[in-house]
Image (cartoon, rainbow, N blue to C red):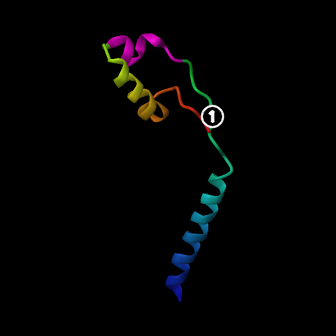
Amino acid sequence: MKSSKFIKWPLIALSILFIGAQIFRPARTNPAVDEANTIQSRLHIPADVDAIIKRACYDCHSNQSRWP
């Protein structure tokens, strides 16, 4: 019976933390982009490859995310 306390209370604490984390959301803003530091300004990238990079990668790997 004692071992059930060691499982029960941590699960309750984790549940409370999980529910509490749902209340606080990060700000959905994009910082300003310095065009001199972009990959397009440093490398010659063909237009079709640039379009693929922007479509597939920019939401997660840039400061140009499109928020829903």
Number of other residues with Cα within 10 Å of mark 1, as a class: few under 14, some 14 to 19, many 20 or more: few
Q: Quadrant of residue 67?
A: top right
Q: Secondary structure at mark 1?
A: loop
Inspect the image, locate mark 1, and give the three-letter code of the amino acid beneath it: Arg
Q: Residue at x 68, y 50 (%)?
A: 23
Q: Is residue 11 magenta?
A: no
Return the residue nearer the eye: 19 or 9.
Answer: 19
Q: Pick out the residue farthest to the right.
A: 23
- Is the residue 23 above or below the residue 42 in the image? below
| Chain part drawn in magenta | 33-42
Task: Find disc 1 in the rendering and name its residue.
Answer: 28
Q: Position of residue 61 (x, y in %)?
A: 43, 32
- Is the residue 57 above or below the residue 31 in the image? below
- Is the residue 6 above or below the residue 33 in the image? below
- Magenta-colored segment: predominant secondary structure: helix
Return the residue nearer the eye: 28 or 10.
Answer: 28
- Left/right of residue 30 with respect to residue 58 in the rendered view: right
Q: Position of residue 17 (x, y in %)?
A: 61, 58
Q: Residue at x 65, y 59 (%)?
A: 19
- Is the residue 27 above or below the residue 17 in the image? above
- Left/right of residue 41 with respect to residue 22 in the rendered view: left
Q: Is residue 35 magenta?
A: yes
Q: Pick out the residue farthest to the front.
A: 48
On the rendered image, what quadrant is the C terminus found in?
top right
